[in-house]
């Protein structure tokens, strides 16, 4: 009765809160967008009377003023806008560098919602009081992000589980944010045709809603577990299939050492250097071996068990590569291993990156900063998402990446995160080169298919 009563009382209050939240987000977003746009219009009027070299400092100063305002706005509103900022930070062909530097600092984290809000969501979704579903449910979350938070709990049979819960009404807020962003993209495109953000908007509208149905995340975990079942060095948490909904995911709780806690790893008798090789190989198996991969291997999503096995958690961002893109990355890996620049150029065109024919500097920047292939470039042990986004964006400067898919961009981000991670574990080196064994198999299979179809 208590659960039913809370449902009936929640209705009008929830609707009122949701209406206010949507209006507030719209007002804050468009107010700050208007302030930023006004600044650029002022600079544009002044720049018309100046030579390009005189106007350049004005534009740079405006970028430096506006980027922090945009960052503050996104941090204030959080939610899907955090993910939008992360996507923008990976597009140096569209976004000036001050924005890339600012937005790359965005992390998909948020203050935790009060326990009673989460408890109400769990009870509404699973149709019973928490006390009937779990023998214990910890009030303090173990993680909180822009769309959901995770709590540790115990089932009546004693199993220890992690419970991921989408925030109430997050779907409606994401829908409102997408509508607002779509309008902003149209307005910006009309005033400044050079800044055409439609390709980013389309990718956001395609990828973000996938994270709003936790049944999809459960399917991702099951698929990756099945595809890696031949390995004895990896663990994927089991999904509790009889307890869950689109907004609540219950899975095996993993108790491990955070992968970058090197001292704790050594104390447990686990050598960090070979562990780095295992993790890089594990992602080569996913990206090239199967074409379906965990898209966010930051250190918080990789735990090491006491027996040395690697545990992957949080499969909300799991992506499948189109076959031509998978072959492109296989060609890139093999060409990097063979030190074949022509092959690498051919590969990145397959992936969807187009470099100016006359600007080999763009290619060298990409090879050096994105792939880490410069002999005089030290490996960067900063494995944070911010550092990786900045490196990746600088590597793509001068290239056209309108033809690249979100999935392909995530592969570049994955290799950047892995590169930083392996340096932090004392085993620096190129990631794509280490995937060559998988690349050879992909290319051999493609060649065989082509012979059979001829």
Image (cartoon, rainbow, N blue to C red):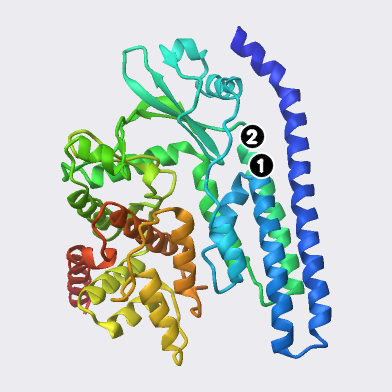
Which corner quadrant of the image does residue 202 belong to? bottom right
User: Who is closer to the viewer here, 268 or 334?
Assistant: 268
Count residues near mark 2 (Cα–Cα under 10 Å), then give few for <14, some for 14-19, many for 20+.
Answer: some
The total of numbered circles placed on residues is 2
- Seen in the image, is 352 located left or right of residue 442? right
Residue at the far top in the pictured view: 1
Asked whether residue 79 is in view, the answer is yes
Q: Which mark is residue 169?
A: 2
> Is residue 134 at least partly visible in the picture?
no
Whether 380 is drawn above or below 376: the answer is: above
Q: Residue 316, image x and y in percent?
A: 44, 44
Viewed as shown, does residue 453 lie left or right of 124?
left
- What percent of the width, then of the height, locates residue 115? 57, 22
Q: What element carries label 1?
A: helix
The quarter of the displayed image where residue 438 is located: bottom left
Q: In which quarter of the image is the C terminus?
A: bottom left
Using the image, tell me which numbered label, if any, was put on residue 363: none
Horizontally, is 210 left or right of 98 in the view?
left
Q: Which residue is drawn at 71% across and 88% down?
A: 52
Asked whether disc 2 touches disc 1, contact meaning CB atoms under 8 Å apart, the reply is yes
| Residue 340: x %, y % from top left | 25, 82
Residue to which mark 1 is pinned: 173
Please tell me how crowded label 1 is: few (under 14), some (14-19), or many (20+) other residues with Cα within 10 Å: some
Q: Please, is residue 296 above or below residue 98 in the view?
A: above
The residue drawn where x is 39% and y is 54% is 383
Name the residue: 65% across, 18% down: 7
Please tell me which residue lies in front, 368 or 329. 368
């Amino acid at each position: 009765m208590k659960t039913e009563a809370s449902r009936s009382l929640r209705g009008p209050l929830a609707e009122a809160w949701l209406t206010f939240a949507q209006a507030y987000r719209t007002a804050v977003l468009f107010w700050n967008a208007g302030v930023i746009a006004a600044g650029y219009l002022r600079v544009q009027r002044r720049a018309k009377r100046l030579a390009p070299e005189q106007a350049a400092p004005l534009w740079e100063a405006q970028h430096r003023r506006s980027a922090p305002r945009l960052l503050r706005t996104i941090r204030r509103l959080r939610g899907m806008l955090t993910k939008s900022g992360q996507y923008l930070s990976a597009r140096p062909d569209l976004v000036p560098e001050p924005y890339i530097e600012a937005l790359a600092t965005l992390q998909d984290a948020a203050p935790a919602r009060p326990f009673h809000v989460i408890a109400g969501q769990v009870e509404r979704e699973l149709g019973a009081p928490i006390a009937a579903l779990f023998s214990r449910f910890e009030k303090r979350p173990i993680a909180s992000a822009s769309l959901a938070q995770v709590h540790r709990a115990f089932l009546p049979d004693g199993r220890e589980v992690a419970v991921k819960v989408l925030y109430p009404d997050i779907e409606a807020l994401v829908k409102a944010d997408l509508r607002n962003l779509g309008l902003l993209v149209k307005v910006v495109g009309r005033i400044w045709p050079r800044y055409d953000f439609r390709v980013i908007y389309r990718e956001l509208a395609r990828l973000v809603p996938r994270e709003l149905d936790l049944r999809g995340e459960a399917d991702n975990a099951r698929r990756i577990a099945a595809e890696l079942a031949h390995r004895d060095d990896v663990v994927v948490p089991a999904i509790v299939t009889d307890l869950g909904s689109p907004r609540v995911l219950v899975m095996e709780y993993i108790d491990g050492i955070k992968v970058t806690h090197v001292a704790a790893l050594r104390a447990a008798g686990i050598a960090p250097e070979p562990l780095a090789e295992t993790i890089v190989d594990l992602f080569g198996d996913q990206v090239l071996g199967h074409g379906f991969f965990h898209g966010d291997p930051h250190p918080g999503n990789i735990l090491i068990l006491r027996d040395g096995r690697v545990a992957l958690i949080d499969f909300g961002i799991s992506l499948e590569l189109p076959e031509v893109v998978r072959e492109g990355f296989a060609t890139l890996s093999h060409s990097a291993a063979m030190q074949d620049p022509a092959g690498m150029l051919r590969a990145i065109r397959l992936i969807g990156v187009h470099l100016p024919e006359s600007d080999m500097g763009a290619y060298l920047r990409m090879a050096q900063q994105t792939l880490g292939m410069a002999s005089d470039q030290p490996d960067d042990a900063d494995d944070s998402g911010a550092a990786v986004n900045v490196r990746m964006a600088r590597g793509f400067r001068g290239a056209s990446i309108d033809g690249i898919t979100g999935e392909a961009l995530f592969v570049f981000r994955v290799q950047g995160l892995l590169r930083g991670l392996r340096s932090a574990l004392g085993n620096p080196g190129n990631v794509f080169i280490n995937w060559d064994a998988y690349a050879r198999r992909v290319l051999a299979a493609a060649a065989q298919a082509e012979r059979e179809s001829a």
